[in-house]
Amino acid sequence: MAEVLVYVDHVDGAVRKPTLELLTLARRIGDPVAVALGNGAADTAGVLAEHGAVKVLTHEAAEYADYLVVPKVDALQAAVAAVSPAAVLVPSSAEGKEVAARLALRIKSGIITDAVDLEAGDDGPVATQSVFAASFTTKSTVSTGTPVITVKPNSAAVEAAPAAGTVEALTVSFSEAATGTKVISRTPRESTGRPELTEAAIVVSGGRGVNGAENFSIIEALADSLGAAVGASRAAVDAGWYPHSNQVGQTGKSVSPQLYIANGISGAIQHRAGMQTSKTIVAVNKDAEAPIFDLVDYGVVGDLFDVVPQLTEEVKTRKG
């Protein structure tokens, strides 16, 4: 089978879940070859092999941490030249999409972003996308060059599939542009102990109906009982009730969890665009005519201040 490059998103050797999902998708169209860069790259080999990587190309250099995305693009370009893959898969994060776009331009190939599924086709990989504010689903292929495809987190279940995982050193020559933009400082993000929003299997969100920053503790309590991430609508964020980093929607983050619980959110198209691909959607809203109810799998017409605390207690009771 043809080989498929998978860009590894890791932190000092700890592989993040979206990469393991990419390996599952890559096996549908070829033999996954992982590309791990930066500090701890060699430490990723074990978990990557467990999830289907037949080969792991590694390269460690200070440039990956000291500068922005160009060194990673240089490395992926070198990997494409070495492997001649059937496709290149990249996690659909903000950085991932920039890396993918720059790579596609370098190798003169087409690019597909924010895919939610992937399958083999007669003319190469076929990517499924949710487009026009999640109003339509399309299937696309790249007609020029090696397809570069970014895939949203939670688009596939992680599946173990032990493979050789042979580690090989990747030879990389950095371009002049690689050191053009230097990272001069970093501030660690304060940890909440909750999953990262775009990667979470469950997301609990609050909107205008939460009616104040102090009331988001109700949303957080439900999220914590479920081991979920906390999201917010644009209205809640604009009002200053919750950080912008937690905004779900067209101008925020797109999520595709197994379960999405919307509380006090009307369901405007801007919000729907960021969560419509969720597998199961539940809404709590006291307005029976709220547009969100046209989208949900389960809806509760009621005051979230009555419903959500009861739901939280019920979850705790069943878990305890």
Image (spheres, rainbow, N blue to C red):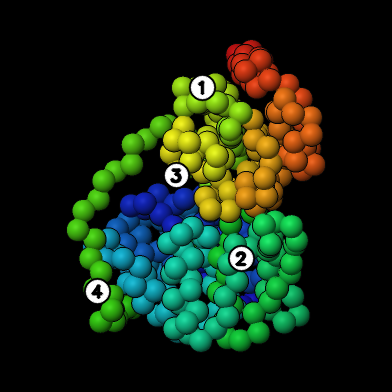
Q: Of the residues under marks 3 and 1, which one precedes in the sequence?
A: 1
Q: Position of residue 311 (x, y in %)?
A: 66, 19
Residue 286 against residue 110 in the figure, above or below = above
Q: Which residue is mark 4?
A: 180
Q: Disc 4 to disc 1, how far (Cα)?
A: 45 Å
Q: Is residue 126 left or right of residue 251?
A: right
Q: What type is the residue that disc 3 sits on?
A: Ser
Whichever of labels 1 and 2 marks the residue nearer the N terminus, that label is: 2
Q: In percent of the image, x 41 and y 32: which residue is there?
A: 192
Expressed as whole percent of the image width and height from the top left, the position of residue 219 reads 55, 26
| Residue 38 visible in this rendered orientation of the protein | yes
Q: Please provide percent x and percent y for residue 84.
A: 52, 83
Q: Which residue is mark 1?
A: 215
Q: Which residue is mark 2?
A: 26
- 271 relative to 287 in the view: left or right: left
Distance, label 4 to label 3, CA atoms, is: 27 Å
- Which type of secondary structure does the marked residue at label 2 adopt? helix
Residues 235 and 222: in front is 235
First in residue order: circle 4 vs circle 1: 4
User: x%, y% of residue 29?
Assistant: 66, 70
What residue is pinned by disc 3?
245
